[in-house]
Image (cartoon, grey):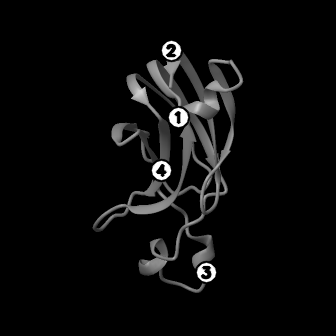
Amino acid sequence: MVVFNGLLKIKICEAVSLKPTAWSLRHAVGPRPQTFLLDPYIALNVDDSRIGQTATKQKTNSPAWHDEFVTDVCNGRKIELAVFHDAPIGYDDFVANCTIQFEELLQNGSRHFEDWIDLEPEGRVYVIIDLSGSSGE
């Protein structure tokens, strides 16, 4: 497995087609829970370490952030982006996530990645990732 050592710069630009999970709708009232708008933010982790999180955007299922994070990575294997709904009561609700392996980012020889990434179970997020450093087995 390839690991990355160096500087990671990631810009989280926007997300589209976010949908609340059944758990997020447990407090929703009214006849149309499918029109429920989220208060989303994205938590960014490298391996099991929290790097940061975006600001919360109010009442939208297609938020735009343009938040940038820079961190030193030592023996990094993966980047995880997890979308949460900023719940007014209790813990924040999971919405969707994705995992990006450093190995996949480095395999084409480029240190720059810019694209839409599919989230599970639904949605997509647009990110720009720049890597400067070295990789090894």
Q: Amino acid at mark 4?
A: Ala
Which residue sits at x=37%, y=63%?
87
- x then y, percent, for residue 131: 54, 19
Sooner in the amino-acid sequence: mark 3 or mark 4: 3
Q: Amino acid at mark 3?
A: Arg
Q: Nearer the viewer, mark 1 or mark 2?
A: 1
Q: Quadrant of residue 26?
A: bottom left
Kindly report the distance in space between the C-alpha atoms of the residues bearing marks 3 and 2. Answer: 51 Å
Q: Nearer the viewer, mark 3 or mark 2?
A: 2
- x then y, percent, for residue 63: 58, 47
Kindly report the distance in space between the C-alpha atoms of the residues bearing marks 4 and 1. Answer: 23 Å
- Comparing 46 with 31, the one in front is 46
Q: Residues within 10 Å of mark 3 (few under 14, many from 20)?
A: few
Sooner in the amino-acid sequence: mark 2 or mark 4: 4
Q: Which residue is mark 4?
A: 82
Sooner in the amino-acid sequence: mark 3 or mark 1: 1
What SS does tag 1 mark?
A: loop
User: With respect to residue 34, does 49 lie above or below?
Assistant: above
Q: Residue furthest bottom?
A: 31
User: With respect to residue 104, does 57 lie above or below?
Assistant: below
- x then y, percent, for residue 43: 42, 45
What SS does tag 4 mark?
A: strand
- Comparing 130 with 65, the one in front is 130
Kindly report the distance in space between the C-alpha atoms of the residues bearing marks 3 and 4. Answer: 26 Å
- x then y, percent, for residue 57: 48, 48
Which residue sits at x=50%, y=14%?
134
Res. 134 mark: 2
Kindly report the distance in space between the C-alpha atoms of the residues bearing marks 1 and 2. Answer: 14 Å
Q: Which residue is mark 1?
A: 1
Which residue sits at x=49%, y=52%?
83
